[in-house]
Amino acid sequence: MRRPTVIGNWKMNASFAQTADLLAGLSEGWTGVHQAEVAVCPPYPYLAKAAELLEQSNIAFGAQDLSQHASGAYTGQVSADMLLDLGCKYVLVGHSERREYQGETDTLIAEKFEAAAKKGLVPVLCVGETLEEREAEKTFDVVGRQLRAVIERVGLEGVAKGVVAYEPVWAIGTGRSATPEMAQEVHAYIREVLGPEGEHTAVLYGGSVKPESAAALFAQQDIDGALVGGASLKAEDFLAICRAAE
Ligand code: PEP
């Protein structure tokens, strides 16, 4: 059995005051015991606030990135140990915005995945093709390459300790979600690559998930939940997506 999982990626959004409101709204709306695992990834400066305001809830939290290094002269970077000190459970690794704007390579992403997993954080490995790659029928090649880079570094057992998020780049922040069938096709492929070792690994879909589209996506056999960007910035919308995952 795989636990349905919904993770919010706030990206570089929200002020300190908005963070407090949003976290309070989530905490009030998600008390008690739930089947779904729920987590949010606010910007670094607000992680301590998340630790404080989510303490009484069943909502975990994580960071949007980490350094591949354990410590040292790496100005501006944040290590796995620092995230653990703050109470983080998750860390996103290889989000397409970091691949594109920070030039993160498959090799670097594999190093970051290893650095997180080695310390006991749960890395959320983001994979997905661009529109150009989809139109050139390269979706499986790209997603397979991105997965294999991490498998080569940490093995199938290592990858199985994390979460995988299939996020077609053309669907992120565009309002144009993959159809449930399109997403399912890639999720089935990811599951095949993960093999029996990944039997319990959650594979999430990400890309313009909204309260209205969540249920149909989650009804697919190999979609175990969602990584949510825009809709995770409104407590009501995010909680509706979380409820759809149960
Ligand atoms: C994301 O950034 O991971 C994401 C899925 O964003 P959105 O839901 O806004 O498309």
Image (cartoon, rainbow, N blue to C red):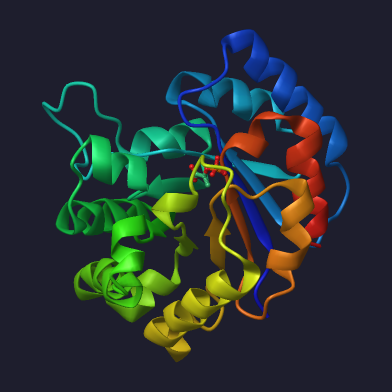
Q: Quadrant of the C terminus?
A: bottom right
Q: Quadrant of residue 189?
A: bottom left
At 86% from the left and 31% from the top, the residue drawn is 28
Q: Residue 165, position in %: x, y?
A: 48, 60
Q: Is residue 244 left or right of residue 166?
A: right
Relative depth, front residue between 208 and 13: 208
Q: Is residue 141 above or below residue 41?
A: below
Q: In this view of the protein, which residue sits in the foreground, 54 or 142?
A: 142
Task: Find the residue positioned furthest to the front.
Answer: 135
Q: Camera-side residue: 235 or 124?
A: 235
Residue 73: quadrant of the picture: top left
Residue 140 in percent (x, y) is at 34, 76
Residue 26 x, y percent position in the rendering: 77, 33
Residue 217, image quadrant: bottom right
- Residue at 74%, 73% in the rendered image: 219
Q: Report the residue at 52% width, 79% height from top.
A: 185
Whether residue 245 is visible to the viewer of this picture, yes or no, is no
Looking at the picture, how far across and down is residue 226, in whole percent?
Answer: 61, 56
Q: Residue 231, can we see it?
A: yes
- Residue 13, placed above or below residue 224: above
Write the residue at 37% across / 60% down. 127
Q: Is residue 103 above or below residue 142?
A: above
Q: Residue furthest left?
A: 73
Horizontal placement of 73 versus 122: left or right? Answer: left
Quarter of the image where the N terminus is located: bottom right
